[in-house]
Amino acid sequence: MASPTTVRARAVRRQRLRRIPLHVGTLVALVALWWLVTRLGLVRPLFLPPPGDVWDAFVRANTDHPLSPGSDRIVRGEQNYYLWEHLLASLQRIGLGVGAAVVVGIPVGLVMATTWLGVVLEPYLSFLRALPPLAYIGLLIVWFGIGDTSKVWLLFLAAFPPIAMATISGVRGVREDMVNAVLSLGASRRQTLTAVMIPATLPEILTGVRVAVGFAWTTVVAAEIANGIPGIGALAYLSGQKLNSDLVVACILVIGLAAIALDLGLKFLEKVLVPWRGKA
């Protein structure tokens, strides 16, 4: 006879499988509505290009093609890079920025939650969290130049606050009786931190990382405004300046799908690292 855990897992799996037709049907309906609106001419193509034109722009951005109809000059993708290369460059910047935010944000959050520094620094952390990226991108360029360093710094500053604040929230949510129990058994402060505090805080930290990745994606266009090629955010920005709506929508869809894929990966990582979450 299967255990309750196995039965529950099978039920969850069946429920997810039943949702697949719903998701596919919703997507098909949205694309059909999009096509119908553009086909009837309810919206000008400059504002909402048809799905076929967006697909052509996507294919064009990933292949070698003539510079213009009838031209003998062959160009590579868009801005001399394929679309997947633009995406990879942005992912690398986001990986560096969010990775640095994880390395710095978690220890800072632990220190702020367990010492008097939390009272002093938390208002400044909230201040940093409230700042829009465009407010200080110019200053970062002055400090670090228009290369990748300023972009990574901007993404770090976007990702750091949610990770630190999630860590603080997680530590403050740990029950005192759990900490007192291990201390009474002779555990040191370091052992208490590694055996109780961090495991109990890990679900909150992973949630903070997911939020931070989302913030990083919303910041990538601002980060890549200056000298951001290759970069999917810069490509979307430059395409908008040229009124190339087809390519702008293609970039938006790629950014959104990449963000969904990253979020699904983080959800899977959460299940691996904290399998007990939601089972209490």
Image (cartoon, helix red, strand yellow):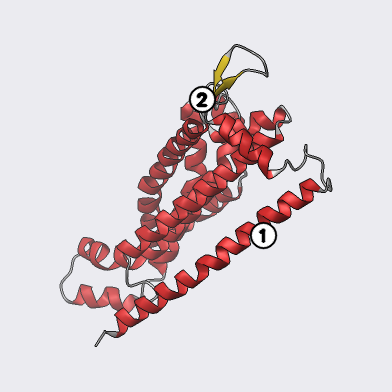
Q: Quadrant of residue 68?
A: top right
Task: Please name whichever residue, 94 or 161, is drawn nearer the observer in this view of the structure.
Answer: 94
Instruction: Kindly identify the residue that appears in the image at 78 percent across and 51 percent down.
Output: 37
Outermost residue on the front side: it is 70
Q: Position of residue 96 (x, y in %)?
A: 41, 38
Residue 146 percent location from the top left of the image: 54, 23
Q: Is residue 142 above or below residue 258?
A: above
Which quarter of the figure is the C terminus placed in?
Answer: bottom left
Left or right of residue 225, residue 62 in this image: left
Percent coordinates x, y for residue 139 in the rendering: 58, 30
Q: Residue at x 60, y 38 (%)?
A: 251
> Closer to the observer: label 1 or label 2?
1
Query: Which numbered marker is on residue 29?
Result: 1
Furthest toward the left, the residue is: 186
Residue located farthest toward the top when viewing the structure as drawn: 72
Q: Is residue 79 visible?
A: yes
Q: Which residue is mark 2?
A: 81
Q: Quadrant of the N terminus?
A: bottom left
Choose top left, top right, bottom left or bottom right for residue 238. top right
Callout 2 amino acid: Tyr
- Residue 10 screen position, x and y as percent: 36, 77
Helix, strand or loop for disc 2: loop
Disc assigned to residue 182: none
Residue at image point 50% right, 30% down: 150
Q: Amino acid at mark 1?
A: Ala
Query: In this picture, is 185 found above or below 99?
Result: below
Q: Are marks 1 and 2 in contact (CB under 8 Å)?
A: no
- Marks 1/2: CA–CA distance: 33 Å
Q: Determine whether, in the image, residue 112 is placed left or right of residue 224.
A: left
Instruction: Answer with mark 1 or mark 2, whichever residue precedes in sequence.
Output: 1
